[in-house]
Amino acid sequence: MIIKESYITLTDLRFHAFHGVMPQERLTGNDYSVSLRIGYPVFDACLSDEVDDTLNYASVYDIVSQEMNVPSQLLERVAYRIADRLFRKFNLITVLDVKLNKLNPPFGADCYGAGIELHLINDKTEL
Protein backbone atom coordinates (compact mmCIF):
# COMPACT_ATOMS: atom_id res chain seq x y z
CA MET A 1 0.00 0.00 0.00
CA ILE A 2 1.22 3.49 -0.86
CA ILE A 3 0.04 6.65 0.87
CA LYS A 4 -0.16 9.26 -1.87
CA GLU A 5 -0.77 12.26 0.38
CA SER A 6 -1.15 12.69 4.10
CA TYR A 7 -2.26 15.59 6.24
CA ILE A 8 -2.34 16.35 9.92
CA THR A 9 -5.14 18.68 10.97
CA LEU A 10 -5.84 20.86 13.96
CA THR A 11 -9.31 22.34 13.66
CA ASP A 12 -10.84 25.38 15.31
CA LEU A 13 -8.23 26.07 18.00
CA ARG A 14 -9.64 28.90 20.14
CA PHE A 15 -7.73 31.89 21.47
CA HIS A 16 -8.41 35.29 23.00
CA ALA A 17 -5.82 37.66 21.54
CA PHE A 18 -5.14 41.34 20.88
CA HIS A 19 -4.79 41.73 17.11
CA GLY A 20 -6.33 44.51 15.08
CA VAL A 21 -5.99 47.94 13.58
CA MET A 22 -8.45 49.64 15.92
CA PRO A 23 -7.07 50.76 19.33
CA GLN A 24 -10.02 49.11 21.12
CA GLU A 25 -9.11 45.73 19.57
CA ARG A 26 -5.60 46.01 20.96
CA LEU A 27 -7.00 46.92 24.39
CA THR A 28 -9.89 44.48 24.93
CA GLY A 29 -8.95 41.77 22.44
CA ASN A 30 -11.17 39.43 20.48
CA ASP A 31 -11.83 35.73 20.11
CA TYR A 32 -10.10 33.87 17.28
CA SER A 33 -10.07 30.43 15.76
CA VAL A 34 -7.13 28.83 13.98
CA SER A 35 -7.31 25.76 11.77
CA LEU A 36 -4.33 24.03 10.19
CA ARG A 37 -3.97 21.42 7.46
CA ILE A 38 -0.38 20.23 7.35
CA GLY A 39 1.05 18.02 4.61
CA TYR A 40 3.44 15.67 6.36
CA PRO A 41 4.82 12.18 5.63
CA VAL A 42 3.06 9.87 8.10
CA PHE A 43 3.80 6.45 6.61
CA ASP A 44 6.41 5.53 9.26
CA ALA A 45 3.97 6.45 12.04
CA CYS A 46 1.28 4.31 10.43
CA LEU A 47 3.55 1.30 10.88
CA SER A 48 5.39 2.14 14.11
CA ASP A 49 2.65 3.70 16.27
CA GLU A 50 5.36 6.03 17.65
CA VAL A 51 4.85 9.79 18.06
CA ASP A 52 8.50 10.39 17.08
CA ASP A 53 7.60 9.22 13.57
CA THR A 54 4.99 11.92 13.00
CA LEU A 55 4.25 15.57 13.69
CA ASN A 56 3.38 16.05 17.35
CA TYR A 57 0.09 17.98 17.69
CA ALA A 58 1.14 19.44 21.02
CA SER A 59 4.30 20.94 19.52
CA VAL A 60 2.29 22.49 16.70
CA TYR A 61 -0.25 23.89 19.17
CA ASP A 62 2.54 25.45 21.27
CA ILE A 63 3.84 27.37 18.25
CA VAL A 64 0.36 28.59 17.30
CA SER A 65 -0.34 29.66 20.88
CA GLN A 66 2.94 31.57 21.14
CA GLU A 67 2.31 33.46 17.89
CA MET A 68 -1.29 34.25 18.84
CA ASN A 69 0.09 35.93 21.97
CA VAL A 70 2.13 38.43 19.90
CA PRO A 71 -0.18 41.38 19.03
CA SER A 72 -0.27 42.43 15.38
CA GLN A 73 -2.40 44.81 13.39
CA LEU A 74 -3.11 42.35 10.58
CA LEU A 75 -4.28 38.75 10.68
CA GLU A 76 -2.21 38.21 7.53
CA ARG A 77 0.92 38.88 9.61
CA VAL A 78 -0.14 36.50 12.40
CA ALA A 79 -0.99 33.68 9.97
CA TYR A 80 2.32 34.13 8.17
CA ARG A 81 4.29 34.08 11.43
CA ILE A 82 2.57 30.81 12.40
CA ALA A 83 3.42 29.29 9.01
CA ASP A 84 7.00 30.53 9.06
CA ARG A 85 7.65 29.05 12.52
CA LEU A 86 6.09 25.72 11.56
CA PHE A 87 8.16 25.44 8.38
CA ARG A 88 11.35 26.30 10.27
CA LYS A 89 10.65 23.84 13.12
CA PHE A 90 9.38 20.92 11.01
CA ASN A 91 11.36 20.77 7.77
CA LEU A 92 9.38 17.75 6.49
CA ILE A 93 6.18 19.80 6.11
CA THR A 94 5.35 19.81 2.40
CA VAL A 95 2.28 22.06 2.33
CA LEU A 96 0.49 24.11 4.94
CA ASP A 97 -2.93 25.71 5.08
CA VAL A 98 -3.46 28.23 7.87
CA LYS A 99 -6.93 29.61 8.46
CA LEU A 100 -7.26 32.41 11.04
CA ASN A 101 -10.63 33.98 11.86
CA LYS A 102 -11.58 36.88 14.08
CA LEU A 103 -14.86 35.64 15.52
CA ASN A 104 -16.38 39.04 16.35
CA PRO A 105 -15.05 41.50 13.78
CA PRO A 106 -15.74 45.13 14.69
CA PHE A 107 -17.52 46.21 11.53
CA GLY A 108 -21.13 45.60 12.50
CA ALA A 109 -21.81 42.54 10.37
CA ASP A 110 -23.82 39.56 11.56
CA CYS A 111 -21.35 36.82 10.63
CA TYR A 112 -19.34 33.89 11.92
CA GLY A 113 -16.09 35.80 11.56
CA ALA A 114 -13.66 37.44 9.19
CA GLY A 115 -10.17 36.26 8.49
CA ILE A 116 -7.40 35.04 6.28
CA GLU A 117 -6.48 31.70 4.78
CA LEU A 118 -2.95 31.03 3.53
CA HIS A 119 -1.89 28.07 1.39
CA LEU A 120 1.87 27.65 1.42
CA ILE A 121 4.22 25.15 -0.22
CA ASN A 122 7.59 24.32 1.28
CA ASP A 123 10.01 24.99 -1.57
CA LYS A 124 12.69 23.01 0.28
CA THR A 125 10.86 19.67 0.00
CA GLU A 126 10.04 17.69 -3.09
CA LEU A 127 6.35 17.26 -3.84
Image (cartoon, grey):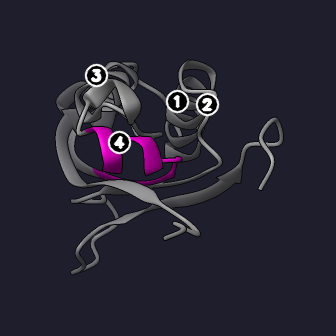
Label 3 neighbourhood size at 10 Å, few (<14), some (14-19), many (20+)?
Answer: few
Q: Which residue is mark 3?
A: 62
Q: Residues within 10 Å of mark 2 (few under 14, many from 20)?
A: some
The residue that mark 2 highlights is 87
Which residue corresponds to the image point at 24% horizontal and 79% vertical from the top-left?
A: 111
For label 2, the SS is helix
Task: Assign a secondary structure to mark 3.
Answer: helix
- Residue 45: mark in rendering: 4
Q: Are marks 3 and 2 in contact (CB under 8 Å)?
A: no
SS at mark 1? helix
- Disc 4 residue type? Ala
Q: Residue 65's x, y, as percent?
A: 28, 26
Span shown in magenta: 34-48
Q: Is residue 122 left or right of residue 49?
A: right
Disc 3 and disc 2: Cα gap in Å?
14 Å
Relative horizontal placement of residue 12, taking residue 26 as reference (left or right)? left
Does residue 18 show up?
no
What label does residue 86 carry, if any?
1
Query: Gap in Å between the C-alphas at discs 1 and 4?
Result: 19 Å
Of marks 4 and 3, which one's residue comes earlier in the chain? 4
**Among the 4 quarters of the image, the one containing residue 66:** top left
